[in-house]
Structure formats: C-alpha cells, structure tokens
Image (cartoon, helix red, strand yellow):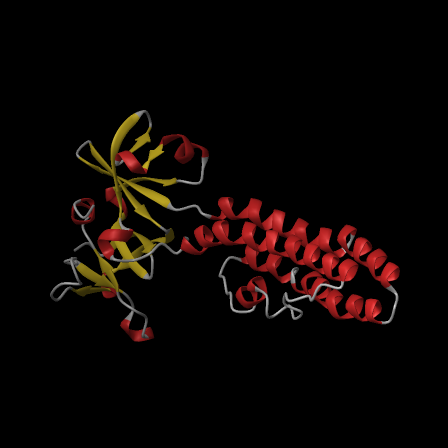
Amino acid sequence: MADEQSLVIFQVGRITLALPLQEVEHILSLGGEEGRQGISAEGGMILFQGQAIPWRPLWDPLGEPSVFREFDELAQTLPRRRQDHLDWMAALEQSLRHDIPFTKAHSPRECAFGQWFYAFRTEDRRLALLLSQFEHPHAVVHGLAEVLLGQVAAGRREEALAALEAARQGVLAELLALFDTVIALVPTLKRPLALILNDSGQRTALGVDRVLDIRSVSAAEVHPARGRLGSLVPQAFIGDSASGGALIPLLAASQLASLG
C-alpha cells in the first residue's frame, strides 16, 4: 500500500466508513438544486450531469436509520403541536365564557409539546437555537389558565376575556410564529448526500448521511482487516491506535455499490 492514501470518510446512521478518494467522482447534496431536480428514489435512479445512474441508498442495506430521521418526525409532529395550542386557547376561552371545566394541561411540561420539548435533543445548532426560544412563550401561554380562571372565579370575567385576547395577539402569536419558523426550517436541514462513484465509466450514486472528512492517511494509520463486519468485508481499518481512536472500515467502492 502506498505511503499515503487519500480517503473520503462518511457517515451512514451510526456507522462511519471510508472509501478511497480516487473512487469518488463527485459529492452531490440531495438538498441542493441539482439533487432536488435529479433525485428519483422511487425509480432507483438519480440524474447527474444529464445521465441517469443507479441510486443505492445505504441505510436499509446497512440496517441504519438516517441521522436525518428526526427531521422527518419533526415535519410530522410540529404542525400538530402548533394546532394543539390554538385548540388549547379556544378551550380556555370556552371555559372563561361559559364556566365549562378546563381539562387541558395547565403545566407547560404536561402538554404533548412540552413532554416532547423537554426530552428532545439535537446536534443541529440552528434547530437547537430556535427551539431554545420556545420555552418562555410556551410557559406564559400555559400560565394563563390558572390566572384567568382565577379572575373568573373572582367575578372578573370581562377582565379575564380581555387578557385572553391580548395574549392571543401577543404571546400566542409569538409562539405560533416560532412554530412556523421551525416548520419552514426543517426541510432545509435534511441534506443527505450522494457519493458518485465512477468505475471505468460505470457510475453509481451511494446515498449517505454526511461526509465527515476528506484526508490523507499514512501507512501507520492503516491496520490489516480481519474477517467481516456484518455484510461488509473491509480492505483495511483506518485509525490511530496510539490515541485510542476508533478504527474506521476502509471499503472498496464496488462492494458498497452492490449492496443496494
């Protein structure tokens, strides 16, 4: 093996793998314009530079869900949680006007969104920053129940209704705007990649989550392969045993291309 070898190191779910850089012709973002116009996962093909080439997403063959699956779940969940808070305010208004028992969550930690919000973790910094802005307006909205129901109990119904309307125009509108911002952001966060391989003119597109690094490794960082890794037969393992770093399987592009 040469003294130095250039590699593409990439991620599929929780798995990190490496390919020789010389076997990767292009790295295509499926969230970019070219990817949006060219990808056709249902047909098993992707359009690249005017050529239809086989599309081989690696998640299912490797038994790994995409790291972007959380964004698919968010796209499903957030519109429902937004509507929950419109329904919550409507139910509170009915209670204030007609003395109907208010049975929805008083605590911001008890509603469906709150239970999800306080348990959710993400590595995406933009998403984390936006979500951090939810806590205050969400807590204020839920705090309305005790205050306004107390006002009605004290005979101050009109005051409570006026405060509810002010909250609807103020803090609720702020909360809904945050929902709208995150709902619009989520599709832009899901940007898996296609590694375009070219084997003597035969192209294949491998679907992966992220490219973590493109770097050269020395012979000292290349360790002999022993046996199989699930369905994969590594050519070698890449890593630095002196630092205790995890070893990364180095694979042949042809092996991955045949998985799909």
Residue in the foreground of this view, choosing between 46 and 16: 46
Quadrant including the C terminus: top left
Q: Is residue 1 above or below residue 188?
A: below
What residue appears at the point 68 percent right and 58 percent down from the top-left corner?
Answer: 91
Closer to the camera in the image, 121 or 183: 183
Residue 44 in the image: x percent, y percent? 26, 36
**Which sits in the foreground, 230 or 116?**
116
Residue 80, placed above or below residue 15: above
* Figure disc tally: 0
Tell me which corner region of the image, top left, top right, bottom left or bottom right, holds residue 107: bottom right
Which residue is pictured at 65% across the width and 60% down the height?
134
Residue drawn 18% across and 50% down? 252
The part of the image, by quadrant, that contains residue 96 is bottom right
- Horizontal side of 260 relative to 208 (left or right) equals left
Q: In which quarter of the image is the N terminus?
A: bottom left
Residue extending farthest left: 227
Q: Position of residue 72 (x, y in %)?
A: 44, 50
Residue 133 position within the rendered picture, expressed as x and y whole percent measured from the top left: 66, 60
Q: Where is residue 86 in the image (x, y as percent from the top left)?
A: 66, 53
As drawn, is 179 to the left or to the right of 48?
Answer: right
Q: Nearer the viewer, residue 118 or 214?
A: 118
What residue lies at 56% left-to-right and 48% top-to-bottom?
A: 183
Q: In this view, does 160 lie above or below 186?
A: below
